[in-house]
Image (cartoon, helix red, strand yellow):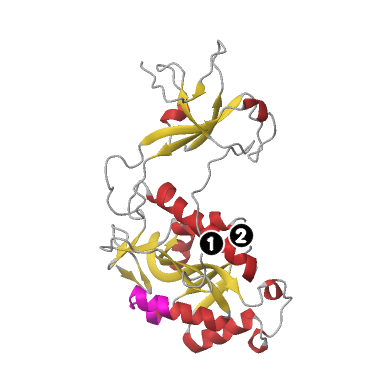
């Protein structure tokens, strides 16, 4: 549906063959099913103020391990399965590249309206060419086909709330010479400047692409994970690559071995161990039935019996 210059996506969150992640079909009945629990029972090390601002004295840390098909289209697995693993890979590769090319910047390349009808493949080529001309030497591209109108924006634009077609690329990458000069600039004539923003202005004049640098991010992995949650995939393509690499970070130019992310306790940083719940099956911890993936729980019950124990491979028979 077209309203003015805004094309609202249909109920399947699609625009042609392109679709918002997490809006396909559930792969199988096991998606999201809890397979096991891992955690840290070393409560003696938890009597400190943690990063969440709380003291977890007498509590164990528990992490649910759920089955994931790792498909970006799956409405159950896309966010905490597929996106989490992809974000870890991105973080590791960029950390290695950062040793040579400096600080990772979060950049957005917005497509001009006249190019909205082009295919994803053509848009990617044009975006990479524009980024190179602005001095972005490499990084990872995450394609977003849609933007979202919240209630306030919808009121201002006189359009319905919801997702609408507005293709752009989120980039985590490196700028030649860095961005600190422009970030701390007190103003001036950017058109005549040879800094990054000067190159951006000239690129916009030539091809209409808007390149912008976002505020400094807290973590690379967290930024990648969030952007992957709103990325766009191509329907009907079995292994569509949402995150693609270019320039100095391409697979041909940067060789990095990505190891599986270790599961550690957020307080004492010990490796997590496989646990089993040892409490009363009729009065179970409320966190077990909740949607929480990670939580802190009481270590012992009223009688001093451990509620969570390290699983030595012996199955509990109720």
Residue 45, magenta (yes or no): no
Horizontal side of residue 131 vs 158, given as left or right: right
Secondary structure character of the magenta stretch overall: helix
Task: State the residue at coordinates (38%, 61%).
Answer: 163
Say which residue label 2 marks: 217
Horizontal side of residue 100 vs 20, given as left or right: right
Residue 229's quadrant in the figure? Answer: bottom left
Residue 115, magenta (yes or no): yes
Q: Eyeballing the image, is 265 above or below 243?
A: above
Q: Secondary structure at mark 2?
A: loop
On residue 93, the disc is: 1
Report the quarter where the C terminus lies. top left
Q: Position of residue 52 (x, y in %)?
A: 63, 39
Task: State the residue at coordinates (39%, 19%).
Answer: 316
Q: Secondary structure at mark 1?
A: helix
Horizontal side of residue 29 vs 266, given as left or right: left
Residue nearest the observer in this picture, 20 or 137: 137
Residue nearest the observer in this picture, 308 or 207: 308
Q: Magenta stretch?
A: 114-125
Residue 160 can be seen, yes or no: no
Residue nearest the observer in this picture, 257 or 162: 257
Which residue of the protein is positioned furthest toward the right in this rendering? 186
Disc with the residue nearer the chain's start (1 vs 2): 1
Residue 14's quadrant in the figure? Answer: bottom left
């Amino acid at each position: 549906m077209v309203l003015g210059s805004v094309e609202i996506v249909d109920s399947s969150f699609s625009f042609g063959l392109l679709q918002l992640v997490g809006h396909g079909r559930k792969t199988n009945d096991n998606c999201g099913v809890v397979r096991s629990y891992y955690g840290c029972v070393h409560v003696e090390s938890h009597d400190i103020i943690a990063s969440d601002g709380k003291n977890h004295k007498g509590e164990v840390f528990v992490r649910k391990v759920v089955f994931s098909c790792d498909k970006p289209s799956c409405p159950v697995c896309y966010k905490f399965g597929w996106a989490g693993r992809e974000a870890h890979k991105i973080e590791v590769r960029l950390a290695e590249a950062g040793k040579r090319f400096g600080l990772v910047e979060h950049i957005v390349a917005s497509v001009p309206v006249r190019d909205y009808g082009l295919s994803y493949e053509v848009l990617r080529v044009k975006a990479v060419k524009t980024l190179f001309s602005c001095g972005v030497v490499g990084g990872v591209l995450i394609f977003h086909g849609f933007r979202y109108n919240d209630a306030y924006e919808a009121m201002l634009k006189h359009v319905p709330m919801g997702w609408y077609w507005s293709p752009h690329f989120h980039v985590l990458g490196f700028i030649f010479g860095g961005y600190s000069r422009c970030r701390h600039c007190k103003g001036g004539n950017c058109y005549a400047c040879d800094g990054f923003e000067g190159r951006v202005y000239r690129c916009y004049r030539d091809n209409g692409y808007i390149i912008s640098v976002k505020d400094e991010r807290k973590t690379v992995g967290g930024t990648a994970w969030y952007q992957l949650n709103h990325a766009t995939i191509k329907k009907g393509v079995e292994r569509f690559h949402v995150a693609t690499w270019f320039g100095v970070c391409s697979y041909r130019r940067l060789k990095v071995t990505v190891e599986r992310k270790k599961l550690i306790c957020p307080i004492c940083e010990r490796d997590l161990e496989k646990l089993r719940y040892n409490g009363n099956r009729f009065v179970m911890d409320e966190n077990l039935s909740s949607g929480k993936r990670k939580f802190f729980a009481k270590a012992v019950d009223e009688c001093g019996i451990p509620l969570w124990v390290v699983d030595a491979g012996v199955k509990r028979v109720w």
